[in-house]
Image (cartoon, rainbow, N blue to C red):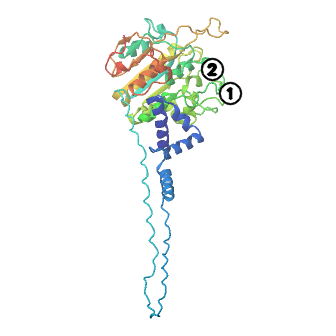
């Protein structure tokens, strides 16, 4: 029952927001007063503004008011007859007894107005790609990832020949959280997300009417899942949708999980209805879900921990770190995704970057220098992409969201809908959308 309610709720919300561009549905459903409005709207959906129940009651009342009044018949008076001079024998005249007039028939009740029915919105047209896998990393720069002497040889030399390299993919900010948020919602960086929300406050959590791609997939009967490496509760036990308590700071373990790598934990649309708790999982669930197409989400988002994502000074002493750590992580995970039934049938793998890795300081006692190079590149691999392709058009995290929305017939959210936001859906539909 809950699943059905969630689907209907999402259908009302996301269809209004992403298929028609209106966001009032979610605002209405987010409060008890609005829920009453929905019920009232259901009762007053007829063409006359009255629902069947209201119309019936009003019609019956009006019919009663218009019923004719039945007046009682008044008997006529007999004329008096003067007696003749000579008495006559009295004659008794028999008369028929008076009968009461028959009551007028009650008027037939007025027909109830038929409720107005609106034609259903046509189902969005979904392209050939129905399973998208996103792996989000920290970048040590384009040359480190895809250059002539790369620090990520698996990505640059093994995986890159299988896909389409976006050579002009650029981040919106050097921090991880604003880029990750933009990639799933189209929301631009703001003062709070640029600092990666050191305190988990309302200023960092988007209001319930701000939707994400995770909200959009319900009306088309698609599923989403996010898999976070090393995500655990305060006791160290694997847990779902982990984030700090309200108005509390995060104290991440070095090299471990950090909420700044988990954009789904920053939207009330996912937190308040339990979607984040249900679908934002520790990465230990991923391999099992990949075994069958029906257990593989249509949209899968993967975030390694701080060490394996490629952040410097986050790995154990002596172990690979930075770009080398991220590359080793890809070499282990990507073959499992490419071998999954869902990917082989209709999949798309996106290896992208959500942060610019700070440059380590020569003085180990000093913090790293923020990265200034936001051109990081991104690689797309799919059975629907020509291997070894290169695309030099300008792309951003908004473009990744726009690409998925275009492929699945969804209306772009926020900045993903800007005219300058370029989509890759054309390439995945069989036409050339790049340079």
Q: Give above or below for 264 relative to 367.
A: below
Q: Secondary structure at mark 2?
A: helix
Residue sitting at 36 percent across and 29 percent down?
126
Residue 284 pos. (x, y %): 50, 31
Q: Residue at x 57, y 14 (%)?
A: 312
Q: Mark 2 or mark 1, which is nearer the start of the sequence?
A: 2
Q: Residue at x 32, y 18 (%)?
A: 431
318 with respect to 245 (left or right): left
Residue 332 visible in image:
no
Identify the residue at the far front of this view. 85
Q: Position of residue 220 (x, y in %)?
A: 41, 34
Mark 2 surroundings: few (<14), some (14-19) or many (≥20) residues within 10 A: some
Question: In this rendering, would 21 be left or right of 254?
Answer: left
Q: Quadrant of residue 293?
A: top left
Q: Disc 1 marks which residue?
A: 248
Residue 260 location (% of width, % of height): 58, 22
Of residues 223 and 398, the one drawn nearer to the viewer in this rendering: 398
Q: In which quadrant of the rendered image does the C terminus lie? A: top left
State the residue in front, 1 or 287.
1
In this picture, is 305 found above or below 215? above
The residue that label 2 is drawn on is 192
Given residues 132 and 72, the one toward you in this image is 72
The image quarter containing residue 173 is: top right
């Amino acid at each position: 029952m809950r699943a059905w309610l969630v689907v209907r709720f999402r259908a009302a919300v996301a269809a209004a927001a992403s298929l028609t561009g209106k966001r009032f549905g979610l605002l209405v459903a987010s409060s008890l007063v609005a829920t009453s409005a929905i019920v009232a709207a259901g009762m007053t959906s007829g063409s006359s503004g009255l629902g069947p129940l209201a119309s019936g009651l009003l019609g019956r009342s009006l019919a009663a008011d218009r019923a004719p009044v039945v007046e009682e018949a008044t008997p006529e008076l007999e004329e008096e007859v003067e007696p003749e001079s000579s008495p006559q024998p009295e004659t008794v005249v028999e008369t028929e007894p008076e009968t009461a007039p028959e009551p007028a028939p009650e008027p037939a009740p007025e027909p109830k107005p038929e409720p107005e029915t609106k034609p259903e919105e046509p189902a969005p047209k979904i392209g050939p790609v129905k399973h998208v896998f996103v792996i989000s990393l920290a970048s040590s720069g384009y040359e480190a990832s895809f250059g002539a002497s790369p620090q990520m040889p698996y990505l640059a030399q093994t995986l890159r020949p299988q896909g389409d390299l976006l050579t002009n993919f650029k981040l919106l900010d050097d921090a991880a959280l604003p880029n990750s948020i933009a990639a799933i919602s189209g929301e631009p960086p703001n003062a709070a997300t640029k600092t990666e929300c050191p305190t988990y406050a309302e200023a960092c959590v988007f209001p319930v009417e701000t939707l994400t791609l995770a909200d959009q997939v319900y009306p088309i009967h698609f599923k989403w899942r996010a898999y976070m490496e090393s995500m655990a509760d305060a006791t160290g036990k694997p847990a779902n949708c982990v984030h700090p308590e309200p108005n509390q700071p995060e104290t991440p373990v070095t090299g471990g999980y950090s909420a700044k790598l988990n954009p789904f934990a920053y939207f009330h649309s996912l937190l308040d209805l339990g979607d984040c708790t249900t679908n934002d999982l520790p990465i230990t669930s991923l391999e099992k879900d990949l075994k069958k197409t029906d257990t593989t989400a249509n949209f899968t988002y993967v975030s390694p921990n701080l060490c394996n994502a490629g952040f410097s000074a986050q790995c154990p002493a002596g172990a690979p770190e930075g770009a080398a750590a991220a590359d080793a992580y890809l070499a282990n995970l990507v073959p499992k995704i490419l071998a999954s039934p869902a990917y082989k049938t209709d999949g798309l793998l996106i290896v992208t970057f959500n942060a610019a890795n700070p440059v380590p300081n020569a003085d180990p006692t000093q913090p790293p220098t923020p990265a200034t190079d936001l051109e990081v590149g991104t690689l797309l691999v799919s059975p629907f992409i020509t291997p070894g392709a290169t695309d030099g058009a300008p792309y951003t995290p908004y473009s990744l969201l726009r690409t998925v929305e275009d492929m699945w017939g969804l209306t772009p959210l926020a900045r993903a809908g800007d005219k300058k936001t370029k989509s890759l859906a054309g390439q995945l539909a069989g036409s050339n959308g790049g340079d």
